[in-house]
Image (spheres, rainbow, N blue to C red):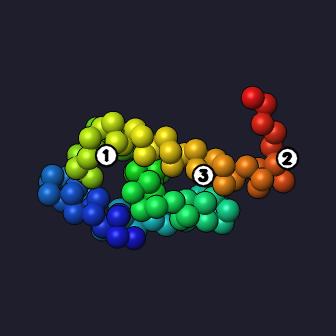
Amino acid sequence: MKELDEVIAFQNRENTPYTSAHAGLAEETYESMMGDEVTHAINKLSVNFRVVLLLSDVEEFSYEEISKILDIPIGTVRSRLNRARNSVKAELRLYAQSMGFKDNR
């Protein structure tokens, strides 16, 4: 995953203990914790949205950290994350309904 390699490179520049072994574990965790439908929905996102979503919701980086990693304004991080989450939610709506989930809004 190219984006993950960029995160690792950034972490290495910052002299943090994040290694390629951690990256392999993170990618394996990402693939095993989500079903095919979720993975497919995330992979349909453009790279800019997918990277922000994964860094935030899978890797649990803060908005500030993502802003530094990707060298983009924090407002752009927030906007991309919001749009990515809404896109994934819309993509998974029918799947969720088929699994018995109801939209109680």
Q: Residues under labels 2 and 3: Cα distance?
A: 18 Å
Q: Where does residue 72 sit, x and y in percent of width and height?
A: 26, 47
Question: Compared with residue 37, is residue 53 higher up or lower down, i.e. above or below?
Answer: above
Question: At label 1, which amino acid type do we have?
Answer: Ile
Question: Compared with residue 77, is residue 91 higher up or lower down, i.e. above or below?
Answer: below
Classify mark 1: helix, strand or loop. Answer: helix
Q: Where does residue 87 sit, x and y in percent of width and height?
A: 58, 50
Tell me which numbered mark, 2 or 3, is placed earlier along the sequence.
3
Disc number for residue 88: 3
Classify mark 2: helix, strand or loop. Answer: loop
For discs 3 and 1, the disc positioned in front in the rendered view: 3
Closer to the camera in the image, 89 or 27: 89
Q: Where does residue 31 sit, x and y in percent of width and height?
A: 55, 65
Q: Say which residue appears at 14% left-offset and 57% top-offset.
A: 13
Classify mark 3: helix, strand or loop. Answer: helix
Question: Compared with residue 12, is residue 102 higher up or lower down, i.e. above or below?
Answer: above
